[in-house]
Image (tube, rainbow, N blue to C red):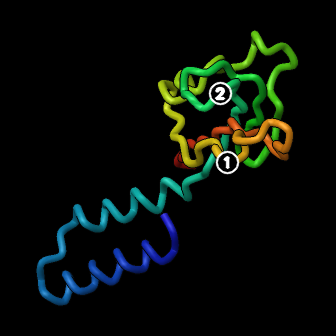
Amino acid sequence: MSCEAIANKLDQAIAELRAGTLQESTLAAIRDEVAAGPATQDLLYLQASGTDVNSEVIGMRLVLDGEVSDGPDDPDDWPYQTVVEAIRDGWRIIDFPNLALLLDESRTYAYGAEFVLEKIRSA
């Protein structure tokens, strides 16, 4: 939870205290959210053979806890063989392939079928 979100919840609790409606459960909920710590974002970049989520993964890069990894050297050992497998494992797509990069195969400057996925975890 961000500092701003905590401040907003505390302001709301102060208003409830002044109104005489503050409940112990309100303070307990704020305490639990603060104790959970900040959320972290993990990223998964999957280069696929096509733009469909069922396309075969041909490259990957993973960012977990701020550490960048290309994963296992052997593609058979990658955690996901298709994008949909990653989705089933809780990854959310935050960026789809840029189709404009696939229009002219002779002038592709990047992986046109790159999916970017994220997982948000509590610390």
**Relative vertical location of residue 47 with respect to residue 95 in this rendering, above or below:** above
Q: Earlier in the sequence, mark 2 or mark 1?
A: 2
Of badges 2 and 1, the one in the foreground is 1
Name the residue at 71% across, 39% down: 102
Kind of residue at disc 1: Ala
Residue 50 is marked as 2
Q: Identify the residue shown where x is 54% and y is 35%.
A: 91
Quarter holding residue 65: top right
Report whether 10 appears left or right of 107.
left
User: Helix, strand or loop at disc 1?
Assistant: helix
Amino acid under disc 2 = Gly
Q: Residue furthest top?
A: 76
Where residue 114 appears, as percent x and y from the top left, is 69, 38
Q: Is residue 88 left or right of residue 13?
A: right
Residue in the foreground of this view, choosing between 111 and 63: 111
Measured Cα–Cα span from mark 2 to mark 1: 13 Å
**Mark on residue 86?**
none
Q: Report the disc number at residue 100.
A: 1
Q: Helix, strand, or loop for circle 2?
A: loop
The answer to whether residue 81 is above or below residue 29 is: above
Res. 77 image quadrant:
top right
